[in-house]
Image (cartoon, grey):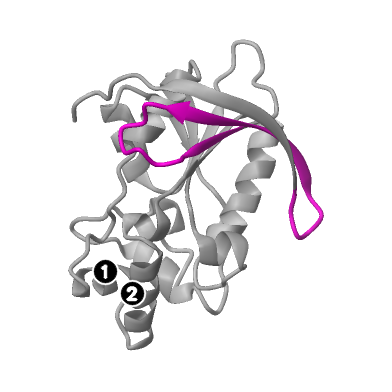
Amino acid sequence: MPRPGPATVRSRVRIPLTFPDGYRAEAEVFTFHGLTDGAEHLALALGTVPEGGTPLVRLHSECLTGDVFGSDRCDCGPQLRESVERISEAGGYLLYLRQEGRGIGLYNKLDAYALQDSGLDTYDANTALGLPEDGRDYTAAAQMLAALGTTGIDLLSNNPDKAAQLADLGITVRHRVPTGVHLSASNVRYLTAKVRGTTLSLAHDLLRGRVS
């Protein structure tokens, strides 16, 4: 994978965060010039990285239904909430990436939900629409980290593809730190599909054996 060109920090502003359960955190939000895909991705600096330490980083793909409306069809909202707290404690960055529906967009994601209601899993529904199982590219994320002066991280993720892509893009992933399993009656099929993976999409290996 070719290395991306440089991005630069465009602006930074402090924003207090309050979640529905009352948890509060202070974030310094960064915007960027020069991101390869032209999207308005954000980096939220949370907590303080100890001197000589490695920042904890979460690549969180935007999910309007889960992050904003609290949908139980996925685990995105709970993962976002968990990530902000854990990164605030350890010190690091949450990269909020504008990659709705694993990169297929909001309308296509909702179309895929309709196919899932007829029995397809999350990956098969995408392919039935002629779309990639996972269309996410983390080149912009690597650019953002480099612009922030970060080339080595601990990655908060259950997804081995994120670590593999970042490594190919010149970001050293020292450890991949698992997130929790946010299971509900509405998302059990979704999580089970992520456990299985496919020939194209790597299995989310932390969950293996914990969702049935």
Identify the residue at horizontal 18%, vertical 58% (top origin): 199
Between 9 and 127, the residue placed more toward the observer is 9
Identify the residue at horizontal 52%, vertical 37% (top origin): 42
Q: Is residue 3 left or right of residue 50?
A: left
Residue 75 visible to an observer of this rendering: no
Which image quarter: residue 46?
Answer: top right
**Which quarter of the rendered picture does the C terminus lie within?**
bottom left
* Magenta span of residues: 18-44
**Which quarter of the rendered picture does the N terminus lie within?**
top left
Identify the residue at horizontal 36%, vertical 34% (top origin): 140
Relative to 22, residue 107 above or below: below
Crowding at dot 2, Cα within 10 Å, few <14 / some 14-19 / many 20+, comes out as many
What percent of the width, then of the height, locates residue 171?
A: 37, 24
What percent of the width, then of the height, locates residue 18?
A: 76, 50
Question: Considering the numbered disc 2 on the image, is that residue within a helix, a strand or a loop?
Answer: helix
Is 28 contained in the magenta span?
yes
Residue 101 visible to an observer of this rendering: yes
Q: Is residue 54 left or right of residue 132?
A: right
Identify the residue at horizontal 53%, vertical 67% (top origin): 65
Tag 2 near tag 1, CB within 8 Å: yes
Relative to 10, residue 197 above or below: below
Is 206 contained in the magenta span?
no
Q: Which residue is mark 2?
A: 112
Q: Is residue 89 left or right of residue 115?
A: right
Could you tell me the amino acid type at mark 2?
Answer: Ala
Could you tell me the amino acid type at mark 1?
Answer: Asn
What percent of the width, then of the height, locates residue 135?
A: 27, 53
Q: Which residue is mark 1?
A: 126
Crowding at dot 1, Cα within 10 Å, few <14 / some 14-19 / many 20+, comes out as many
